[in-house]
Image: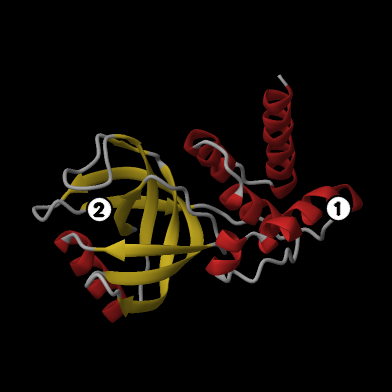
Amino acid sequence: MSLPLFALNAVLFPGCVLDLQIFEARYLDMIGRCMKQGEGFGVVCITEGSEVGEVPAGVSLIGCEARVTDFQQQDNGLLGIRVIGGRRFRVLSSETQKDQLLVAQVQWLQEPVDNPLQEEDDDLVALLAALAEHPMVAALNMGLTASGQQSLANQLAYLLPFTEEAKIELLEIDDAEERLDAIQDLLDEMQGDMQV
């Protein structure tokens, strides 16, 4: 499956909302095509290089499909779009087109069943509820509620201030319980760092 890629300094997770401002011609064309065809594009995290101009030197080989849910002309004249994360994918190969757009052959990853929340998830559910109260998160209007372990893991991995590298690793984990354990380990590390 061929998928146009949008390289960002961010990691998108399934079911999560991302607001983007589009100003580069290659991305404006890509968004136009995606919207006409009712298709999504892939969001991959930049591991080397920068977001603007040249094709970045390195991007993660795992990413998340983005589907446009809303768009509007911003006050600054740029196109503002809101996307929601869809399926995860692995980049098998990629090429840069003449217009500098990165297009990849991707393999869609199997999404595991969303297991019901367990009692041991209560602290993380409470953390998500606390995050929902934060003004920056509330502005995203994501409707933060965890329907199961998968959605809880996705939302926490997306919203918590982990490094991009850590987020890429979390996106690669298929099993929701495993991803929640990894999130808890990262939180414990952060707490440990704060106490030093």
Q: In this view, does 17 lie above or below 43?
A: below
Tell me how the rendering is colored: secondary structure
Residue where numbered disc 2 is placed = 103
Which residue is found at the position 68% from the left and 62% from the top? 132
Q: Is residue 126 above or below residue 67?
A: above
Q: Is residue 36 above or below residue 165?
A: below
Which residue is found at the position 24% from the left and 74% from the top? 32
Q: Earlier in the sequence, mark 1 or mark 2?
A: 2
Residue where numbered disc 1 is placed = 122
**Percent position of residue 93, x then y:** 29, 43
Residue 54 lies in what quarter of the image?
Answer: top left
Which residue is found at the position 68% from the left and 56% from the top? 131
Q: In this image, 87 relative to 157: left or right? A: left
Residue type at the position of mark 2 = Val
Q: How crowded is mark 1: few (under 14 residues within 10 Å), some or many (20 or more)?
A: few
From mark 1 to mark 2, how far is it between C-alphas? 41 Å
Q: In this view, does 80 lie above or below 99?
A: below
**Percent position of residue 83, x then y:** 43, 68
Q: Residue furthest top?
A: 196
Q: Quadrant of the N terminus?
A: bottom left
Nearer to us in this view, 141 or 119: 141
Q: Give the number of marks.
A: 2
